[in-house]
Image (cartoon, rainbow, N blue to C red):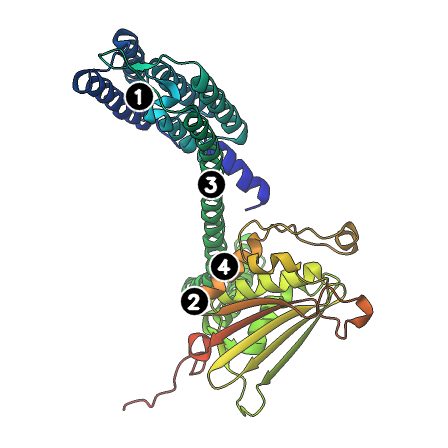
Amino acid sequence: MTEHDVNLFSDQRRSNWIRLRTLILLRWVAIAGQLTAILIAKEAYNLQLELGLCLLAIAVSAIGNLVAMVSFPENKRLSEFENMMMTMFDLLQLGFLLYLTGGLHNPFSILLLAPVAVSASILKLRSNFILGGTTIVLVTILAVYHLPLRTQAGAFLRIPELFVFGNWIAIVIALVFLSVYSRRVTNEMNAMGNALLATQMALSREQKLTDLGGVVAAAAHELGTPLATIKLTSAELMEALPDGSELQEDASLIREQANRCRDILRSMGRAGKDDLHLRSAPLSEVLREAAEPHKDRGVKINMSFEPIEGAGLGQPLALRRPEIIHGLRNMVQNAVDFAKSEVWVESYWSPDTITVRILDDGPGYPVHMLGRIGDPFLRHRKTGAARDNRQSYEGMGLGVFIAKTLLERTGAELSFANGYDPQQRPAAKATPRGAIVEIQWPRAAVEQITAALGENRAMKI
């Protein structure tokens, strides 16, 4: 899943997530609340309102709902423009009601925030700017122009002008804050959802490749018997038919093709059985398998395997789980992408842990991004010279996120650091190492205790 695919998915799908039925239901709730507030103000507090105009505004909203319910199916999903126009209508209707009922002197003026805050999570930035600007204009007009609230005795209900100004400032600030906050949280949730989807796709692909060998081995085994029968039958036909006849040549051709199929299946079965049996392998072989696709990309990959000093242990057998292979492969790819000429893959083990460190001689991680490494779609492009020197992969941080997620699923803990202080001058850098990724597992989480084919047991006779 590339950056273009993710952006296209988000832009096309986000705006039509909302069903028309959902907005209709919310509008009915708003209509009920507006009617209740108007009636309580009129009957319980004897406020002098423009009741006819207020009921007209509420009736227009109710008629709009009824028309939408009749004209469109319940499961209709609104487009970007339709969503924006629905929200704009609600804003203008609420603004008109507030104009009739005291403007910003009315405590319900805070409800102007609701439509914009909700739209910020589903609409594009341009639509949010339009709705936000409209709301600010409405609030400004209502602060100056409105019909005052009056009691039955004719007294005006007004708050001090300083409070009106304070309400205006509070609504504008809350509008901006809630819109930005809602949009930011929604974007992060969408990015995380898309990244997890890409992770699942990568794991599924790796799992299919792992399982394919077993399928090939089983197919080679099952097809062996019918091919042997074809070969035997063709040989008997060759002996029974006259020499030099066309039928004898056909039988000979059948035998040759059966032999060819046998050879093909034998080679496929050997590869499939190797993959089927090698559920685990020495740690060094697992790391070499992970690094193999990146050995011919113009960067030297150095590998070292040794126990932690004093451990005195042989090399562990590591499980060849798809999560481990794919995660390590992505980490090596990231190091090769940014390395100048060399990458180091180092492994250490102790009685309790297995540690893999991947280092490169590139520029290292930017200091301000160290705490965010592993977030999906975190972009850090290479320079043009680095891209021209060798074939590379476009990255957004999605590959690192996938690798980190897959490795953590196997029980690993990952840490990211630089091998030197990026603020030092180049001459002061003692080692040609830039970024460092350290991956550490509890040994029991990834080690195959017995041999790859299982534990040897005595046969009962």
**Sequence order check, earlier mark of 4 and 2:** 4
Q: Which residue is mark 2?
A: 221
Amino acid type indicated by mark 4: Glu
**Sequence order check, earlier mark of 3 and 2:** 3
The quadrant holding residue 421 is bottom right
Residue at the extreme top of the image, as rendered = 52
Is any atom of residue 135 visible in this view?
Answer: yes
In this rendering, the label closer to the viewer, 2 or 1 = 1
Q: CA distance from mark 2 to mark 1?
A: 56 Å
In this rendering, the label closer to the viewer, 4 or 3 = 3
The quadrant holding residue 110 is top left
Report helix, strand or loop for mark 2.
helix
Q: Which residue is mark 3?
A: 181
**Residue 27's spot in the image, x, y percent?**
30, 23
**Sequence order check, earlier mark of 4 and 1:** 1
Q: Nearer the viewer, residue 37 or 223?
A: 37
Up the image or down, 376 lies above or below 328; here it is: above
Q: Are marks 4 and 3 in contact (CB under 8 Å)?
A: no
Badge 3: few (under 14), some or many (20 or more) residues near its Cα, within 10 Å? some
**Sequence order check, earlier mark of 4 and 3:** 3
Q: Nearer the viewer, residue 25 or 144?
A: 144
In this rendering, the label closer to the viewer, 4 or 1 = 1
**Residue 292's spot in the image, x, y percent?**
63, 66
